Amino acid sequence: MPTTQSQPMSGAVEEYLEAIHRLSGKRNALSTTGLAERLKVRPASVTGMLKRLAEMGLISYRRYGRIALTPEGRRRSRAIIRRHRLAERLLSDVLGVPLDQVHDEACRLEHALSPEVESRIADRLGAAVCPHGNPINLAADRSVSLLDAPPSRPLTIVRLEEESPEVVRYLSERGLLPGATVTISRREPLGSAVVIEVNGQEQAIGRMLADTIRVARPQRGKAP
């Protein structure tokens, strides 16, 4: 199997590795169709790139089968995500770019940052998380999704897995950003939505969106 340890990667390859890493932790999301939807490309294009990634030793893949990062693919994808989140911090903290715009801008910057510039950004800003609350160094996840969190107790939003401009604007308008406190009032019949209370008002959040909102894992014990 060819090695890629010292081989530079194209922006397209990096985008796929990042998308595979991000979708790996989501329920039934890592598939040819899921990648096509996330990257806004045709499924046929995804199939061709997956074959290429497998040939590069970055993923294990069989047509219509499981997609998984190899150890080298995981190392590369983690490095890309780290650059992306550092770029988001630079855009947000230094340049004042609005939260709903930093993700797309960081997608362009992440491919151009040299290791030296990446290190300088990290040293200068000293941040542990990106503006959406996601860990820059991909630490162990101690959060739980809003979809799985227990009802009737205060929950603190710690990070947003979905960073697209549309979703961030939607959540921002409803006060559902990192640091906000919410309480799950109830789950609608047939699992269509999660009803939460935010700032004294109830809001219904779709299951798919609720699954991307991460809250601090509650301490064991009875709800107050």
Image (cartoon, grey):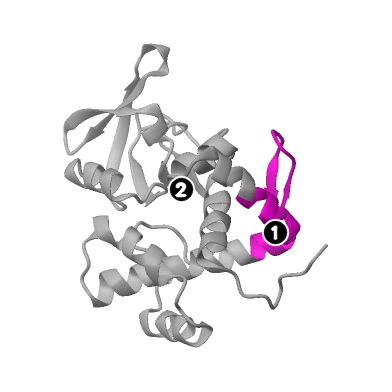
Asked if residue 62 lies in the magenta stretch, the reply is: yes
Query: In the displayed structure, does residue 147 sit left or right of residue 75?
Result: left
Query: In the displayed structure, does residue 143 sit left or right of residue 73?
Result: left
Quadrant of the image containing the N terminus: bottom right
Q: Which residue is mark 1?
A: 58
What label does residue 1 carry, if any?
none
Compared to residue 194, the image places residue 14 above or below, namely: below
Residue occupying image coordinates x 49% and y 82%: 114
Image location of residue 109, percent across then percent down: 39, 71
Quadrant of the image containing the C terminus: top left
Residue 180: tell me if it is visible. Answer: no
In the rendered structure, which disc, 2 or 1, sits on the residue that comes first in sequence? Answer: 2
The residue under label 1 is which amino acid type?
Answer: Leu
In the foreground, 73 or 16: 16
Question: Where is residue 192, by image quadrant?
Answer: top left
Secondary structure of the residue carrying tag 2 is: helix
Asked if residue 74 lies in the magenta stretch, the reply is: yes
Residue occupying image coordinates x 44% and y 79%: 122
Q: Which span is picked out in magenta?
A: 49-75
Residue 49: tell me if it is visible. Answer: yes
Q: Which residue is mark 2?
A: 39
Secondary structure of the residue carrying tag 1 is: loop
In the foreground, 203 or 75: 75
Image location of residue 108, percent across then percent down: 38, 67
In the foreground, 15 or 136: 15
What is the number of callouts on the image? 2
Image location of residue 48, percent across then percent down: 63, 48
**Distance in Å between CA atoms under marks 2 and 1:** 18 Å
